[in-house]
């Protein structure tokens, strides 16, 4: 369900998965301050005004930052070794002033420069449901902390937050579902049962599921800025983090110097129809690159038509095969139907050089490569217990489904892929069973304003990938229409979240934060299409 990318082409890059954690221990837990009496109060125990950001306990309004140990991550992250860490305590629901509080893990990685700029960069993670602290390696490997501190805070509900809203049972069902027909009514029933079981478990813990959304999260980040006593900072959001960034820009623009968004998901057009449009753009970008490469075009002519035919054939008659995954000798049953092939393709743009050969193999009765990749993503240890599905459904079910009818969602599939069977068109990639899941999750709709476009003159870098099949490249020009100082950059031949896969994108991003008015895009001139694998 979350819009995190598949494994990257470069071995040093990470998936956009949430970092497992738990509650940061040893930190002072504070109650809510009474807003009416202490809205502007500040406690400062620093040894002096020049103490590094994040080393001072401060209270502002209803939020409190307390220095302490770094949040826990699933694997050690060297970038956090020198980080200044702690927790931000905020209200779970700001409409309930006497309600419970929650804690969000914070890690501040210092700038590599001896003379850092005063305005740090805040990293907004993908998902929804991924943990920003677990993405620190990606950010630092990309040079984001060259001249500025980079701040990572676990969005509410994610793994290093307390409480976390993880649903391992949903992840475990998704792993088992690779052996089921993806669009079957029986699969839908089991999927919704898993969703409801998690909802019931979280609600039994007293969690206010309606409080896990973009509006509350944006307020959390604004509270962090004030608690850290930062006059201005910069945002850099990836994938779903761009959705949150655009909401933050609209609700709290006063503290923003600049904003970078990569893999853009505008709240104003989010939903199944937009997901189908993005898939069409990403697939077509890859097919076009193959057609323009003589060897690929000769060996795999009319690749788009081949893909469309395979979707129709598999939806009518699914293929069942068995694969063995790396690190295991246990055979795994995999069922490939039309919906499964579309979902595989949405992630497979991350391994674009293999796609033509893999589709050709499937067309000639050899489904093993696609089946292994499809199952490998679901059965990976990293796919279980890291994504905060409570935040996933908190966003989707309050901000997306109430503002897109079932007919509009279906029409999006029909317009993007008119030759697909209706059963495939009805379930957008990565959003399967969204409506029945949201009915089970049962949270109220967000204010209609959540769908407003973001307007203003905050300098913004709008980055996209030419092969992005999860958030189409046309979202860059779309958001730039109402952002007066937006720079739109599409990095060709790259999949979703170009910062993770492209050194050129990293150079552009770092140069943008140096000078938001004139990012250096010269490296785009050197980029070439990948050499597609040519089979026998």
Image (cartoon, rainbow, N blue to C red):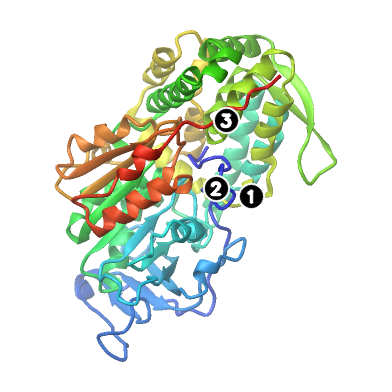
Answer yes or no: do the residues labelled 3 and 2 have beta carbons within 8 Å? no
Answer yes or no: do the residues labelled 1 and 2 have beta carbons within 8 Å? yes
For the residues marked 3 and 2, what is the alpha-carbon distance in whole angstroms? Answer: 19 Å
Of pointers 1 and 3, the one earlier in the residue sequence = 3
Can you say whether 183 is above or below 102 in the image?
Answer: above
Tell me, yes or no, if residue 517 can be seen here.
Answer: yes
Question: What residue did someone put label 3 on?
Answer: 353
Tell me, yes or no, if residue 30 can be seen here.
Answer: no
Secondary structure of residue under mark 1: helix
Residue 186 x, y percent position in the rendering = 66, 23
Question: What residue did someone put label 1 on?
Answer: 382
Of pointers 1 and 2, the one earlier in the residue sequence = 2
For the residues marked 1 and 3, what is the alpha-carbon distance in whole angstroms? Answer: 24 Å
Name which residue lies at 52% across and 29% down. Answer: 346
Badge 1 density bin: few <14, some 14–19, many ≥20, Cα 10 Å: some
Foreground mark, 3 or 2, reads: 3
Can you say whether 484 is above or below 80 in the image?
Answer: above
Badge 2 density bin: few <14, some 14–19, many ≥20, Cα 10 Å: some
For the residues marked 1 and 2, what is the alpha-carbon distance in whole angstroms? Answer: 9 Å
Q: Which residue of the protein is positioned furthest toward the bottom in this rendering? A: 47
| Res 265 → quadrant | top left
Question: What residue did someone put label 2 on?
Answer: 15
| Res 152 → quadrant | bottom left
Quarter of the image with the C terminus in it: top right
* Camera-side residue of 220 and 198: 220
Foreground mark, 1 or 2, reads: 2
| Res 407 → quadrant | top left
Residue 360 x, y percent position in the rendering = 65, 17
Of pointers 3 and 2, the one earlier in the residue sequence = 2
Residue 195 x, y percent position in the rendering = 57, 39
Residue 208 x, y percent position in the rendering = 44, 53
Answer yes or no: do the residues labelled 1 and 3 have beta carbons within 8 Å? no
């Amino acid at each position: 369900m979350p819009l995190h990318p598949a494994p990257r082409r470069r071995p040093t890059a990470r998936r956009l998965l949430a970092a497992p954690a738990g509650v940061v221990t040893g930190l002072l837990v504070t109650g809510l301050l009474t807003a009416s009496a202490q809205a502007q109060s500040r406690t400062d125990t620093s040894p002096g005004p020049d103490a590094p950001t994040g080393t001072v306990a401060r209270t502002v309004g209803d939020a409190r930052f307390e220095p302490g140990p770094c949040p826990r991550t699933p694997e050690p992250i060297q970038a956090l070794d020198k980080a200044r860490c702690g927790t931000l305590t905020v209200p779970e629901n700001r409409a309930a002033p006497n309600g419970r509080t929650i804690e969000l893990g914070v890690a501040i990685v210092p700038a590599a420069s001896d003379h850092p700029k005063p305005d740090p960069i805040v990293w907004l993670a993908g998902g929804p449901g991924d943990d920003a602290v677990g993405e620190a390696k990606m950010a630092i490997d990309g040079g984001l902390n060259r001249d500025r501190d980079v701040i990572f805070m676990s969005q509410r509900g994610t793994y290093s937050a307390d409480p976390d809203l993880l649903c391992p049972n949903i992840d475990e069902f998704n792993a088992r579902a690779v052996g089921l027909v993806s669009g079957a009514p029986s699969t839908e029933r089991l999927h919704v049962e898993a969703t409801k079981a998690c909802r019931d478990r979280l609600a039994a813990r007293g969690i206010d599921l309606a409080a896990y959304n973009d509006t509350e999260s944006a307020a959390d980040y604004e509270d962090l800025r004030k608690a850290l006593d930062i006059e201005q900072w910069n945002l850099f959001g990836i994938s779903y983090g761009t959705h949150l960034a655009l909401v933050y820009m609209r609700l709290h623009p006063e503290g923003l110097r600049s904003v970078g968004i990569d893999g853009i998901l505008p709240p104003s057009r989010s939903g199944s129809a937009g997901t189908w449009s993005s898939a069409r753009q990403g697939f077509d970008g890859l097919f076009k690159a193959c057609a323009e490469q003589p060897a690929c075009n000769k060996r795999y002519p009319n690749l788009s038509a081949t893909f469309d035919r395979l979707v129709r054939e598999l939806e009518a008659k699914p293929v069942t095969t068995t694969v063995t995954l790396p690190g295991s000798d246990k055979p795994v049953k995999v069922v490939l139907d039309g919906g499964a092939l579309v979902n595989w393709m949405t992630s497979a743009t991350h391994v674009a050089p293999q796609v033509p050969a893999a589709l050709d193999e499937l067309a000639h009765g050899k489904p093993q490569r696609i089946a292994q990749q499809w199952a490998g993503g679901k059965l990976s240890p990293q796919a279980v217990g890291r994504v905060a599905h409570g935040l996933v459904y908190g966003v989707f079910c309050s901000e997306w489904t109430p503002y897109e009818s079932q007919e509009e969602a279906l029409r999006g599939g029909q317009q993007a892929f008119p030759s697909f069977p209706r059963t495939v068109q009805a379930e957008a990639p990565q959003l399967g069973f969204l409506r029945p899941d949201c009915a089970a999750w049962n949270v109220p709709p967000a204010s209609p304003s959540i769908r407003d476009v973001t307007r203003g003159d905050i300098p913004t870098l709008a980055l996209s990938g030419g092969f992005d099949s999860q958030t189409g490249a046309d979202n860059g020009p779309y958001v730039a229409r109402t952002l007066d100082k937006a720079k739109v950059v599409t990095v060709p031949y790259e999949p979703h979240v170009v910062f993770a896969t492209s050194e050129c994108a990293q150079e552009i991003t770092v140069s943008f934060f140096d000078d938001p008015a004139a990012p250096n895009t010269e490296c785009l001139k050197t980029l070439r299409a990948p050499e597609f694998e040519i089979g026998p």
